[in-house]
Amino acid sequence: MYFDTQKVSYTERMDTDKGHVYDFTGPCHSCKKPITVTVVGVELFKFNTVARSPMIQDALVSNTKEEREFLISGTCSSCFDKLFREGGLRAVHTQK
Ligand SMILES: [Zn+2]
């Protein structure tokens, strides 16, 4: 998990809607842009305590797919989109 590494720091705060939350901030692996993702405390707790058996999307239900991707791999959404677009899909389409 990228958010476990020393590249990512976090701060704790109380959010009026979500309660105890963590703001994880770290650079995107690819473009180095600083990214901040807010994770709800109870969801992070759920993810960390169930021995990581639940998939991250089952624990961090308040986060978007893009935010979870950053927490896992350190790739921001725009870099991920670029990778995805430049990956196999377009090649498949142009061959048709
Ligand atoms: Zn990026």
Image: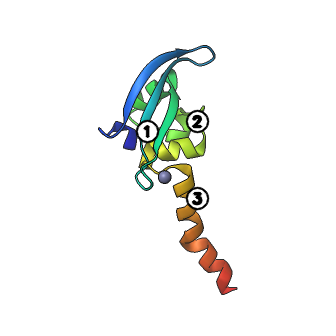
Quarter occupied by the N terminus: top left
Give residue 60's position: percent from left, percent from top.
54, 33
Q: In which quarter of the image is residue 90?
A: bottom right
How many residues crowd around disc 2 within 10 Å: few (fewer than 14), some, or many (20 or more)? some
Would you say the beta carbon of the disc 3 residue lies within 8 angstroms of ligand 1? no
The circle on residue 37 is none
Q: Where is residue 93 in the image (x, y as percent from the top left)?
A: 67, 78
Mark positioned earlier in the residue sequence (1 or 3): 1
Q: Mark 3 points at which residue?
A: 81
Whether residue 1 is visible here, answered yes or no, is no
Q: In this view, does 36 lie above or below 95?
A: above
Which residue is under mark 2? 63
Determine which residue is flagged by label 1.
53
Mark 1 vs ligand 1: CB under 8 Å?
A: no
State the SS at label 3: helix
Left/right of residue 96 with respect to residue 65 in the rendered view:
right
Crowdedness near tag 3: few (<14), some (14–19) or many (≥20) residues, C-alpha within 10 Å: few
**Residue at the location (41% across, 37% down)?**
52
- Image quadrant holding the C terminus, namely bottom right
> Residue 6's spot in the image, x, y percent?
29, 38
Measure the alpha-carbon separation of dots 2 and 1: 18 Å
Q: Nearer the viewer, mark 1 or mark 3?
A: 3
